[in-house]
Amino acid sequence: MRMPRELSCWFGAAVMAVAATPLSATGNDADAGSWQMIVLTGPTQFTVAAPAPVNDPGYLAELASIKTGQGQLTTDQQKAIDYWSKGGVLRWNEILGELVARADLPPEPNPDGTYPVPDANNPFAFPQFPFSNPPYAARAYSYISVAQYEALKVAWYYKYLYNRPSPSKLDSGIKALLPNNDLPAYPSEDAVLSAVTAEILKLLFPASIEEITLKAGEQRQVALLSGKASASDIAAGLALGQAVAAVFNTRAGSDGMKAAGGTAAQWQALADAAVARGEIPWKSQDIPARPPMLPFFGNVKGWMMTPADIVTERPGPPPSTRSTQMATELAEVKNAIDNLTRDQLAIVYKWADGASTLTPPGHWDFIAEPYISNAQFSEVRAARALALLNMALHDAAIGCWDAKYFYFNPRPTQLDPRIKTAIPIPNFPSYTSGHSTFSAAADAVLSYLFPSGTAYFDAQKDEAAISRLYGAIHYRSDIEVGKVHGTRIGGYTVRFAQHDGADHVAGLVSVVNGETLNYASFRAPVAPGSIAAVFETGLGATSNRAAAYPLPTSLGGVSMRFNGSIPAPLFSAAPDQATIQIPWELEGLSSAALTATHADGSSTTFSVPLAAFAPAILSTNHNGTGQGAVTIANTGTIVAAPGSIEGETTRAAARGEFISIYCVGLGPVNNPPATGAATPDASSTTISPVSVLLNGASVPADFAGLSPGLVGLFVVNVKIPDDAPTGDAVSLALSVGGVTSNTVTIAVQ
């Protein structure tokens, strides 16, 4: 099981590779099927059967039908083509905004002073379901955008697996009425989007089912008539989108939203807790008093943040309602509204985002839209942008509502009835400001996605935040603390995005200073015993590499130490990156503090997320995508198309032949070697079974363990099944401990 000498040399060079330049991919994003999932386990969670050959009589009949349809194109059909030319992701986001605004109406009181509650089981009754208030809207925007993104990643995986061209590429008699940029047609991305979006929207906005269904059907018809997709491309996309939607609808049914409204007894308990702390509790300023808006939305399931994260990031308490600071801030609010300028009032109205509007989360989607459009992203990358933005906004809603009802702080008008607001008073506690929290989270994500717009996003964040003081509905502390809170919340999504695989371009990967990433995939977390890249500027002035095993714990004055006492062996140390082995001694921990000591004696400490399993396959481009570091067993021949890698011996693996997959992060092993020491023999096998996913089909590994003669590197041997798919880019992944690795490709003949 020893690594062949040729690949051993390649691996030695690879550990010195530095990949630290952030780039944005252009074109079709052919590797999007390998980008990290959020909810789904991977693209092969769903099966999309292979399409019929392009010379199949049935498929040829589909092409003939498209030509007939284009020859009879009506004015309304051409208008529909123009309408969807904006792109499905952006058009559906616009449609969603219209649904949100239409449903953003607080119920009117009953004659007895009580308020009716919209009923999801009877959505057409008065008041209609839903009341799309800001938290509900944030959740809706996020479910749609994340589901679209996940579904498109699966679609991209199968598009490039089967590589069926679009009808307009196959038949010169079919016009390309919309550009397709050589994107494979099967399954149709338009059908995927129409199905996944419509099925979730029907759950979120059941009173609009007819409208939603018609829009989805129109999008599919446009894909057909424009020459982008055939009937079978569309059928496959429709089935895939519906299958992904079912996963998300199941999640939505148990994410805590149903209990977010609480009960009268629970509302009173929140007020009683504030009184017990010696504070004046918040009260509804509506007449008659309205039940609080979703007081337990802080318990709803987040995307990037766990319940523990929500509590950890909860800001400290606001100024006491009886304190001098509160009196000062209250006076500032009254002075602001009493002396409001015309320009300040314009800012208040711009950011009012009250009833029958897109709401604050939708306002930020509106801000993002031209940046996404002008970037000319592929559909999957456009979906990623909105998914990242809306995940952060949803998590911001959870974090903000958690703080609001934890502290139950009164609005300025409750403490001083002389204050007359410029806009209606929101029916929930004051601290922290929702606008500030939403806007700071959005600013963090959009500044990551579009760095050239950072100054503008920062300015919009600050304007949105201060608008609430100008409107006399928030104190200064609500605003300033909310901005800090929102920035921290947005950081969770940004950190995910930095390592989700979407910024890999031409062998480069986006990394962030002060982070430790899996060496093979450049993602977090990392597993004890595995190889990791530590990115830290100013480590030293020169590059140094370990000359022998066991690995040293210092190179050129650079050293690494976990939790103050556990040294990390070094493969290499360069000015801005070190490659280390994660010590076996960290097994069982979920995180550890890594102190990086620079050559000049200075040091930096940062947290490193750990996991028992963090499988990742090495790739020949050193970024965890594309051609895998996989050899014909017991040789140095890479399993790739002949002549496809300059300077390397390559050939496709035959069915029935054994291959060796080189990887990291497969978890605990039997007979583990000492940290930093080379593995002496083949006895250090994985404790947990490893499965090889070949084109999505699970194949048990013949051998899985540490590669003898090296440190931290695993090898998995597997026999290519007799019925394995063939081609130059057959997908390959690993699964161990319930965790699936990155996806690479190999050639099979």
Image: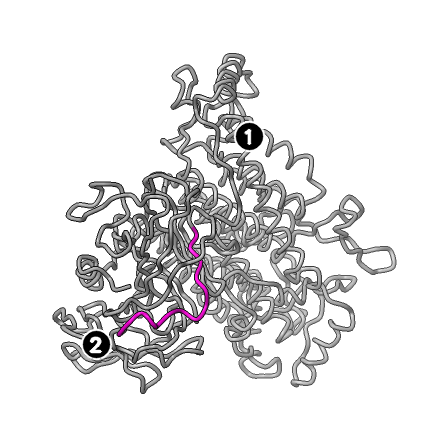
User: Disc 2 or 1, which lies upstream in sequence?
Assistant: 1
The CA span between labels 2 and 1 is 58 Å
Q: Is residue 283 left or right of residue 76?
A: right
The answer to if 96 sits in the magenta stretch is no
- Magenta stretch: give its range: 680-693
Query: Which residue is identified by label 2?
Result: 551
Quarter containing the N terminus: bottom left
Against 25, residue 458 (above or below) is below
**What is the image's colouring?**
one colour
Secondary structure at badge 2 equals loop
Q: Residue at x 70, y 60 (%)?
A: 258
Q: Residue at x 59, y 63 (%)?
A: 301
Q: Which mark is residue 220?
A: 1
Q: Nearer the viewer, residue 667 or 358?
A: 667
Measured as percent of width and height from the top left, residue 747 is found at: 32, 43
The crowding category of the residue bearing disc 1, from other C-alpha atoms within 10 Å (few below 14, some 14 to 19, many at least 20), is many
Q: Is residue 402 visible?
A: yes
The crowding category of the residue bearing disc 2, from other C-alpha atoms within 10 Å (few below 14, some 14 to 19, many at least 20), is many
Secondary structure at badge 1 equals helix
The answer to if 685 sits in the magenta stretch is yes
Q: Nearer the viewer, residue 524 or 476?
A: 524
Against 742, residue 530 (above or below) is below
Q: Amino acid at mark 2?
A: Leu
Q: Amino acid at mark 1?
A: Arg
Q: Which mark is residue 418?
A: none
